[in-house]
């Protein structure tokens, strides 16, 4: 007897329906074909133990399980449940005609209990797209799948519950989640607030500009100046996630198995990998390509602390994703694309000892050491960072000041207003949402400056030794400053402020 059940395979951030055909016939043996990995081949042992525990039997005749299409590699133990139900139906121990109506996924324990799986959100999206009535999966994944409407999400705790559901002995109410209500009432999860920061007004201003225009930032200063503390507070002033952004971000975290509580992500991600991270862990990859840190930071912030300590190869692989806002993982048989639209916030000491240009402590680094240290961060990477900010230590008087600093909520209100201006500006462009995303040809039209402004920019580039690559970046940042100020034209003071944020482009900055 031939039985068909349906599962799903995740490649990248998309799912593909898998047809699981089971035939029980004369002979002996258990075979799984259709490009399964070892975890699927070992499923016989888990399924046999689970079925026996629940009072069912594994057929003692020949059992063949075919997973189609055969050119897609199937990985993981999440196919245990559809294979087990297919075997029961093919051996006439399960009496139902409803198996083809559902996508079925779940990893089984030896007692038949179900364990959670990865990638449920893209699986549910694909199930709805292909017209399946619903999806049957472990209870721990139900809330995540229920984000997708017009799909019956049947949550089961064991293979027995799945059997009882199909045979009509158990009524299971589909899990539902009101995503819009959940989204609207999402609590700000950021405990860090700019109100905690004393002094550093120029750095707060730079981060406000970065948040308003989606610009990348590098902070350079001595140890203990507050670089990490300020970076951790950046997400608290970013605009809230839109519903579309939340779905995109949740999808990536679902595939990576990073959704601890399930459900929709309502806060912008903040990822801060250690400087010992490998290329693959940062950009993604592996035998079965998984999203890396830059994709997990999609629609959020990627913070690289002590930037020169990262391996050169790790930093260089970020150049393409920073420009294209996506990363392509190419393998011999498959090419997978992960979204990677993130804000890069980097920090670094000015030299190995950390005290170059310090107002009080003396730098002990030898001649040429400072420049060699700065050269660890390549020019092409700096080219993609719009704001270079020098962080100076906070004085004792500033630390003990009783005057309250501006809160993140106050700053976020101004950032939101500037983002709304940009949303209206780029309404006809699907891939452009902020000033930082503007391609060079658009900069000329949108960031037009007066003759006086051109003279100022020319003088600045000549006198400060600014490189040619700084030109577009200065104009984009000036446009954001004008948006924050609520003016349509880029004025001289906006341009002057943007110029000061290119410190690392100045010739002879390190001596």
Image (cartoon, rainbow, N blue to C red):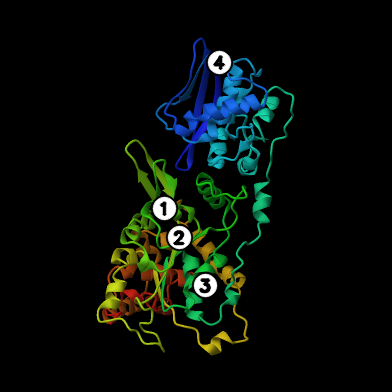
| Residues tagged 1 and 2 counted as in contact (Cβ below 8 A) | yes
Q: Residues within 10 Å of mark 4 (few under 14, many from 20)?
A: some
Q: Specify which label sits upstream in the sequence, 3 or 1.
A: 3
Residue drawn at x 51%, y 72% as measured from the top left: 230
Q: Which residue, given by chain and number where applicable, does mark 3 sit on?
A: 229
Where residue 3 appears, x then y in whole percent? 56, 18
Give the quadrant of the N terminus.
Answer: top right
Alpha-carbon span between mark 1 and mark 4: 45 Å
Q: Which residue, given by chain and number where applicable, does mark 4 sit on?
A: 60
Asked which secondary structure carries label 4, the reply is loop
Q: Specify which label sits upstream in the sequence, 4 or 2.
A: 4
Q: Choose between 109 and 425: the one closer to the eye.
A: 109
Of badges 3 and 4, nearer the viewer stands 4
| Residues tagged 3 and 4 counted as in contact (Cβ below 8 A) | no
Q: Specify which label sits upstream in the sequence, 1 or 2.
A: 2
Alpha-carbon span between mark 3 and mark 4: 64 Å
Q: Which residue, given by chain and number where applicable, does mark 1 sit on?
A: 281
Q: Residue 366 is drawn in which quadrant?
A: bottom left
Where residue 45 appears, x then y in whole percent? 54, 28
| Residues tagged 4 and 2 counted as in contact (Cβ below 8 A) | no
Where residue 341 appears, x then y in whole percent? 45, 55
Residue drawn at x 62%, y 25% as measured from the top left: 51
Q: Specify which label sits upstream in the sequence, 1 or 4.
A: 4
| Residues tagged 1 and 4 counted as in contact (Cβ below 8 A) | no
Alpha-carbon span between mark 1 and mark 2: 9 Å
């Amino acid at each position: 007897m031939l039985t068909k059940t349906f599962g799903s395979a995740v490649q990248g951030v998309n799912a593909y329906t898998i047809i699981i055909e089971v035939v029980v016939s004369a002979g002996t043996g258990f075979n799984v074909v259709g490009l399964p990995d070892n975890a699927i081949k070992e499923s016989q042992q888990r399924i046999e133990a689970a079925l026996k525990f629940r009072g069912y039997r594994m057929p003692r005749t020949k059992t063949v399980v075919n997973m189609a299409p055969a050119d897609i590699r199937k990985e993981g133990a999440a196919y245990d449940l559809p294979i087990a139900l297919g075997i029961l139906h093919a051996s006439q121990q399960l009496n139902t005609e409803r198996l083809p109506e559902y996508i079925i996924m779940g990893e089984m324990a030896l007692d038949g209990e179900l364990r959670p799986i990865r990638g449920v959100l893209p699986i549910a999206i694909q199930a709805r797209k292909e017209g399946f009535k619903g999806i049957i999966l472990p209870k721990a994944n139900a809330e995540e799948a229920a984000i997708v409407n017009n799909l019956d999400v049947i949550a089961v705790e064991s293979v027995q519950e799945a059997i009882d559901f199909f045979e009509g002995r158990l009524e299971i109410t589909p899990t539902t989640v009101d995503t819009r209500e959940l989204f609207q009432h999402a609590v700000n999860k950021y405990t860090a607030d700019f109100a905690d920061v004393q002094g550093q007004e120029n750095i707060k201003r730079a981060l406000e500009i970065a948040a308003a225009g989606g610009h990348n930032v590098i902070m350079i200063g001595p140890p203990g100046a507050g670089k990490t503390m300020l970076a951790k507070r950046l997400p608290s002033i970013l605009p809230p996630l839109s519903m579309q952004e939340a779905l995109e971000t949740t999808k990536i975290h679902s595939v990576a198995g990073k959704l601890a509580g399930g459900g929709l992500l309502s806060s912008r991600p903040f990822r801060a990998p250690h400087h010992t991270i490998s290329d693959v862990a940062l950009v993604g990859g592996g035998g079965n390509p998984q999203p890396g840190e830059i994709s997990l930071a999609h629609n959020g912030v990627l913070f690289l602390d002590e930037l020169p300590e990262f391996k050169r190869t790790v930093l260089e692989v970020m150049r393409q994703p920073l420009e294209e806002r996506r990363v392509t993982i190419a393998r011999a048989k498959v090419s997978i694309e992960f979204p990677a639209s993130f804000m890069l916030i980097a920090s670094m000491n000015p030299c190995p000892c950390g005290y170059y240009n310090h107002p009080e402590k003396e730098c002990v680094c030898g001649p040429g050491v400072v420049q060699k240290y700065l050269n660890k961060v390549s020019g092409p990477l700096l080219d993609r960072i719009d704001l270079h900010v020098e962080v100076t230590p906070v004085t004792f008087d500033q630390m003990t000041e009783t005057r309250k600093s501006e809160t993140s909520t106050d700053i976020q209100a101004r950032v939101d207003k500037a983002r709304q201006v940009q949303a209206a500006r780029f309404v006809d462009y699907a891939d452009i949402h902020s000033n930082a995303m503007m391609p060079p040809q658009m900069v000329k039209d949108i960031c037009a400056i007066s003759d006086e402004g051109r003279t100022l920019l020319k003088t600045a580039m000549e006198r400060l030794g600014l490189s040619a690559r700084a030109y577009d970046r200065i104009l984009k940042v000036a446009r954001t400053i004008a948006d924050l100020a609520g003016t349509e034209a880029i004025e001289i003071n906006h341009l002057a402020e943007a110029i000061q944020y290119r410190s690392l482009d100045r010739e002879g900055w390190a001596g």
